[in-house]
Amino acid sequence: MSGMRNKGHGNNAASGSQASAIPIPEGMAAFDDIYDQPDPRAYFRALGPLEYQAPQHGQGIFRRAVAARRRTVRAAEPVTVLDICCSYGINAALLNHDVTLDDLYAHYTSPQATALTTAELIEWDRSYYAARRRRDPARVIGLDMATNAISYAREVGLLDEGFAENLETAPPSPSLLRAARHARLITITGGASFLSPRTFQPILTCAHDPVWVAAFVLRTTSYASIAACLASYGLVTEKATTHTFRQRRFTDADEQRYAVKAVTAAGDDPYGKETDGYFHTTLHLSRPSEDVTAWQLTDLMPSL
């Protein structure tokens, strides 16, 4: 989730801190101050009232995608997930632990959490997540330009590796490339609006095996340039058409007007979605053609 001024979860308002120098839409609110704190308490306090929910939508889909990927990797190898714009490791928390996003809102806004120092919160979180660890965790690598958020996620054990880098403005470090070559699934629940092929090209070039890319993309933006980049690496991008996913409430009427106008300009209908007060995202899933045939997109989607 980056903020908008080149920081944080992008003003996907709640995207990821891998934001680039792409201009921020004038109508969107900035959340820069919550994306690179020493811990995620401010993040949850700010986004809870706005009903930010994108990571929760990703939980079931990412788990099913990991299960599908597990059938195709070497038996002794865990599935490695690269979470772009990972922020404080929230997608990793939901993927590998028996928690919901509502649980995390309650946890980080509780009186107990509020009373702790960051060091004490890290110790508490280590126990919290260890007690809820699933038996079949994926290996998760995090990428985000927010140094403090990456550090927190690693300290509490949510990320196996984490990299505070922005591939939109600089090439990846050798250590990131070494880690990313094992990725089998790339996930994004926020920040896609602020990414370009520059972020994906080096990762896909270094990957040992074909990678799946699962991205929740705001309906106010286009995913076309990234899909074209993925196609050059042999990945077919499918766009979910059965339903969209709420991201968060608008902060004010200006944001809503911006979103309705942008969605309409893109040729989509905002009625019952953006007109009802929420940003909505669409799931885009990119895979090799043989995997598109083997696993239907609808099988990965939640049942209505």
Image: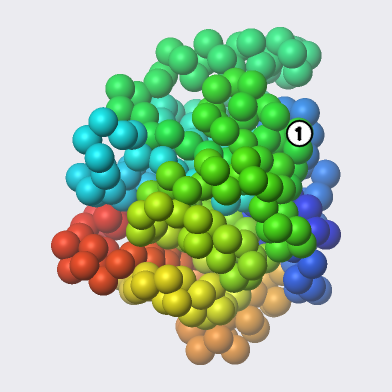
Q: Nearer the viewer, residue 228 or 189?
A: 228
Q: Position of residue 291 (x, y in %)?
A: 23, 63
Q: Position of residue 191 (x, y in %)?
A: 63, 59
Task: Give above or below for 268 relative to 188.
Answer: below
Q: Describe residue 10's horizontal placement relative to residue 85 as left or right.
A: right
Task: Give above or below for 205 relative to 225.
Answer: above
At 20% across and 60% down in the image, what residue appears? 295
Asked if residue 67 shows in the view, the reply is no
At 71% across and 42% down in the image, what residue appears? 164
Q: Nearer the viewer, residue 48 or 197?
A: 197
At 37% across and 70% down in the image, what residue appears? 235
Q: Amino acid at mark 1?
A: Asn
Q: Nearer the viewer, residue 75 or 284?
A: 75
Q: Which residue is mark 1?
A: 148
Q: Position of residue 97 (x, y in %)?
A: 41, 27
10 Å crowding of disc 1: few (<14), some (14-19), many (20+): some
The colour scheme of the drawn protein is rainbow
Q: Position of residue 50 (x, y in %)?
A: 64, 49
Quadrant for the C terminus in the image: bottom left
Q: Describe residue 108's horizontal placement relative to residue 157 as left or right.
A: right
Task: Give above or below for 5 relative to 101.
Answer: below
Asked if residue 80 shows in the view, the reply is yes
Q: Nearer the viewer, residue 49 or 107?
A: 107
At 49% across and 32% down in the image, what residue appears? 93
Residue sitting farthest toward the left: 294
Q: How many marks?
A: 1
Disc 1 element: helix
